[in-house]
């Protein structure tokens, strides 16, 4: 299959997106930008089209899809009813990077929901995504537009790297603003529960609702997350990644990088500008930094992880951040990217937290 790439002209969005919308109506797959990451879209009411998403991504069939709508009225045919606080959340955060789990209606295929009696729905704020959904005239089922397990795509070229020749087309709408996927909130229980942290933070939800829970599977070891997709490997670069957290994470990154370089390895580091300024000069060291804000960190994370693949590093060392606000989503993605190879830097020492210990750290890591 030849994959068409549409570059938007900024003259008339509806004209630019007309062909893509026609392909979606015909049951084809089209990747498109949202404010979070690029989505791989299919007609959400066409089970055969949705099956193509699983095939293109190599996605497990028990991992449900999110349906994207363009306006609030479009959710009502998809659900058997919204809770009062779901209505409140939609009013506060739609359009935007929040997905709500609601009771599904008979209109929704089991292909979309993986046989569950609930469906995930969100209304993106990105004007390209919103216009495309309206033109297609149907909810668009769209997980991230990458091969399963890979870092999510935040640019059209990332999608092309994974999906060229596999899907009908890609809409190039530039880089995504937020850079991590939407927050998933279960609204089917008495209290709202975050199943996946994202661009709408816990603190933002609490301001609207008061009490909000976090799925224990996101924070407790050996507990299965409620959201089926969260149990799978995600966001992984090709090289093994090690994550340094704790109050002295910057010093831990510098120490770990020095020891890794001493082995002759080609080392990738993703950390703050201040941390990278402390690293030694070496042709074997590939560094990518963010400004000292969580917004910049979230926006750049997946891009940098994909870049390391092209730079052929042997291993990656990442610097953690606070879990407050957007940090909860960032750390969720970083921990999964690192396959939970996590170390805590504090009191001048490096402590093992989880995962595997590389040979170059065995003599200094404390358990």
Image (cartoon, helix red, strand yellow):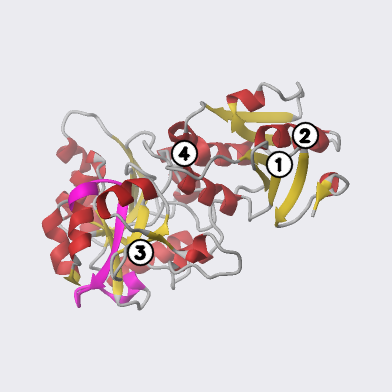
Measure the alpha-carbon separation of dots 3 and 1.
38 Å
Q: Earlier in the sequence, mark 4 or mark 2?
A: 2
Q: Nearer the viewer, residue 238 or 279?
A: 279
Q: Are marks 1 and 2 in contact (CB under 8 Å)?
A: yes
Label 4 with label 3: CB-CB less than 8 Å: no
Mark pair 4, 2: CA separation: 24 Å
Q: Spatial distance from mark 1 to mark 2, Cα to Cα? A: 10 Å
Nearer-N-terminus badge (4/1): 4
Indicate which disc, 1 or 2, sits on the residue closer to the N terminus: 2
The secondary element bearing badge 2 is classed as helix
Q: Which circle marks residue 65 in the picture? A: 3
Q: Position of residue 68 (x, y in %)?
A: 26, 56
Q: Residues within 10 Å of mark 2 (few under 14, many from 20)?
A: some
The circle drawn on residue 298 is 4
Q: Which mark is residue 262?
A: none
Q: Residue at x 11, y 58 (%)?
A: 73
Mark with earlier residue (4, 3): 3
Find disc 2 in the rendering and name its residue.
Answer: 255
Vertical placement of 143 versus 246: above or below?
A: below
Tag 3 near tag 1, CB within 8 Å: no
The residue pinned by badge 1 equals 345
- Tell me which segment is drawn in magenta: 91-113
Q: Residue at x 32, y 51 (%)?
A: 206
Crowd class of label 3 (few under 14; some 14 to 19; many from 20; radius 10 Å): many
Image position, residue 57 (x, y; %): 46, 59
Q: Quadrant of residue 84?
A: bottom left
């Amino acid at each position: 299959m030849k994959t068409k790439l549409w570059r938007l002209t900024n003259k008339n969005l509806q004209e630019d997106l007309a062909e893509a919308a026609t392909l979606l109506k015909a049951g084809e797959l089209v990747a498109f930008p949202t404010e979070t990451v690029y989505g791989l879209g299919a007609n959400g009411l066409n089970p055969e089209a949705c099956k193509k998403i699983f095939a293109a991504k190599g996605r497990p069939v028990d991992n449900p899809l999110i349906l994207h709508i363009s306006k609030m009225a479009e959710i009502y045919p998809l659900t058997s009813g919204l809770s009062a606080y779901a209505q409140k959340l939609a009013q506060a955060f739609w359009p935007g990077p929040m997905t709500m789990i609601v009771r599904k209606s008979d209109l929704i295929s089991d292909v979309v929901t993986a046989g569950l009696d609930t469906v995930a729905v969100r209304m993106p704020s990105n004007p390209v995504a919103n216009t495309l959904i309206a033109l297609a005239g149907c909810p668009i089922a769209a997980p991230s537009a990458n091969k399963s397990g890979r870092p999510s795509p935040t640019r059209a070229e990332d999608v092309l790297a994974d999906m060229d020749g596999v899907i009908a087309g890609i809409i190039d709408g530039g880089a995504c603003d937020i850079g991590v996927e939407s927050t998933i909130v279960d609204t089917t229980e008495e209290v709202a529960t975050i199943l996946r942290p994202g661009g709408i933070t816990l603190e933002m939800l609490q301001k609207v609702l008061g009490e909000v829970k976090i799925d224990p599977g996101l924070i407790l070891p050996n507990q299965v997350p409620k959201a089926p997709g969260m149990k799978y490997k995600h966001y992984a670069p090709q090289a093994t990644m090690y994550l340094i957290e704790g109050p002295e994470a910057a010093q831990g990154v510098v120490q770990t990088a020095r020891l890794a370089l001493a082995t002759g390895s080609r080392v990738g580091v993703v950390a703050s500008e201040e941390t990278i300024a402390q690293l030694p000069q070496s042709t074997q060291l590939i560094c990518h930094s963010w400004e000292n804000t969580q917004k910049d960190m979230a926006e750049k994370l997946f891009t940098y992880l994909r870049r390391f693949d092209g730079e052929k590093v042997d291993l990656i060392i990442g610097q953690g951040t606070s879990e407050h606000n957007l940090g909860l989503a960032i750390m969720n993605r970083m921990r999964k990217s690192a396959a939970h190879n996590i170390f805590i830097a504090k009191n001048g020492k490096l402590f093992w937290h989880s995962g595997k210990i590389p040979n170059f750290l065995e003599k200094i890591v404390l358990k």
